[in-house]
């Protein structure tokens, strides 16, 4: 689903920011 892909993208961005 599109929101699942969006969520994955957001989570990836957050992970990079937090790292």
Image (spheres, rainbow, N blue to C red):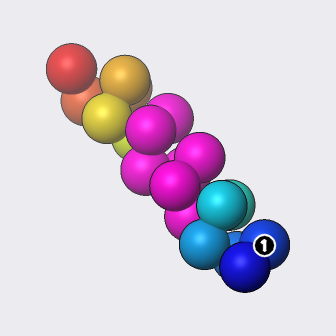
Query: Which quadrant of the view contains residue 4?
Result: bottom right
Is 8 located above or below residue 19 in the figure? below
Is 14 located above or below residue 11 in the figure? above
In the picture of the structure, the residue carrying the numbered disc 1 is: 2
Query: Which quadrant of the view contains residue 18?
Result: top left
Could you tell me which quadrant the N terminus lies in? Answer: bottom right
Q: Chief secondary structure of the magenta span? A: helix
Q: Nearer the viewer, residue 15 or 4?
A: 4
Q: Is residue 16 left or right of residue 10?
A: left
Identified at 68% across, 61% down, the residue is: 6
Residue 17 drawn at (x, y percent): 37, 26
Identified at 78% across, 72% down, the residue is: 2
Which residues, given as a range, are shown in magenta? 7-13
Identified at 50% across, 35% down, the residue is: 13
Identified at 56% across, 64% down, the residue is: 7
Crowding near pointer 1: few (<14 within 10 Å), some, many (20+)? Answer: few
Residue lying furthest front: 1
Q: Is residue 11 left or right of residue 5?
A: left
Residue 9 drawn at (x, y percent): 59, 46
């Amino acid at each position: 689903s599109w929101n699942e892909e969006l969520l994955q993208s957001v989570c990836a961005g957050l992970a990079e920011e937090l790292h």
